[in-house]
Amino acid sequence: MTRTAFITGATAGFGRAAARRFIDAGWQVIATGRRADRLDALKAELGDGVHTACFDIRDEAAMRAALDALPERFRGIDLLVNNAGLAQGTKPAQDALLSDWKTMIDTNVTALVTLTHALLPTLVARKGAIINISSTAAIYPYTGGNAYGGSKAFVSQFSLGLRADLHGSGVRVTALEPGMAETEFTLVRTHGDQAASDALYGGANPMTAGDIADTIFWVATLPPHLNINRLEIMP
Ligand code: NDP
Ligand code: 8X3
């Protein structure tokens, strides 16, 4: 039976690489993001196994409309990859923008719990899995990490709480905590300042989106009696 993965933030980085990885393995993928041109390109590249849904994940009504509009064959979701997320800003708390903090919390926390809540009935019915993309920033504080690290600490702890609640249901839950990986993440974080973005991971030999996509796929396809609770992965 064909399995279906719901991957948020599939227009770039980890999410797009994961969409490719799951389609290569014969899964169906629901790919989401705000950039319609990127979603169209992904659909053109990967074919009918992909259903795209273009919406801002912070917009609950748009999210629910996208769920209501899922074609019949994409309604049985076996895997939710809560990947859409971002950091904004690198300044210490006393110089940070409150609007950046709110954007991170709305995206990384509020949208993640809203989508998870909406899909839990399906995931329980199908004994599915949830992989939440957290970060090493959840565990290790650094200057300028402030609200980003806080939002990812929520993601990791929420994942362990879900894991506890869902124990016995057959639904597996993982918090994946990557360190530095080369994606559009740092460009978003620096509000599009390429030089500042390049400097952030300069000299780090960061991981690739493919490394993380392979890890997501590995976690998702382990035998049903195994649950990776937290997985920290660094370059
Ligand atoms: P990218 O910036 O390359 O991709 C982020 C994805 O999230 C895009 O597809 C973007 O889509 C989507 N997204 C962001 N905001 C929204 C929104 N409001 N509505 C819908 N989609 C949104 O970054 P990564 O691939 O690196 O990041 C993916 C996840 O991994 C994030 O949660 C990030 O915090 C986490 N992470 C990243 C690390 C890294 O070093 N790269 C390390 C550890 C964790 P669009 O813009 O089209 O809406
Ligand atoms: C992204 C990794 O180290 O830039 O979550 O916070 S880091």
Image (tube, rainbow, N blue to C red):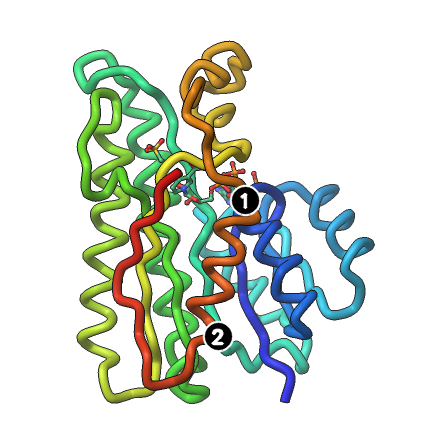
Answer yes or no: disc 2 within 8 Å of ligand 1. no
Discs 2, 1 touching: Cβ within 8 Å: no
On screen, residue 73 versus residue 155, left or right, reads right
For the residue pair 135 and 85, the one nearer the viewer reads as 135
Residue picked out by circle 2: 221
Image x and y of residue 94, in percent = 17, 14
Confirm if mark 1 falls within 8 A of ligand 1: yes
Give the x, y percent position of residue 149. Answer: 24, 37
Q: Is residue 64 left or right of residue 231?
A: right
One can see residue 55 in this view: no
The CA span between labels 2 and 1 is: 18 Å
Q: Position of residue 109 (x, y in %)?
A: 31, 49
Q: How many marks?
A: 2
Instruction: Write down the quadrant of residue 70 in the picture.
Output: bottom right
Looking at the rendered image, the quarter that the C terminus falls into is top left
Q: Is residue 192 above or below residue 175?
A: above
Residue 1, given in percent of the width and then of the height, sits at: 63, 89
Q: Residue at x 44, y 47 (%)?
A: 58
Instruction: In the rendered structure, find residue 209 and report the number of the disc placed on it.
Output: 1
Q: Quadrant of ligand 2?
A: top left
Which of the 4 image quarters holds residue 91? top left
Dot 2: element: loop
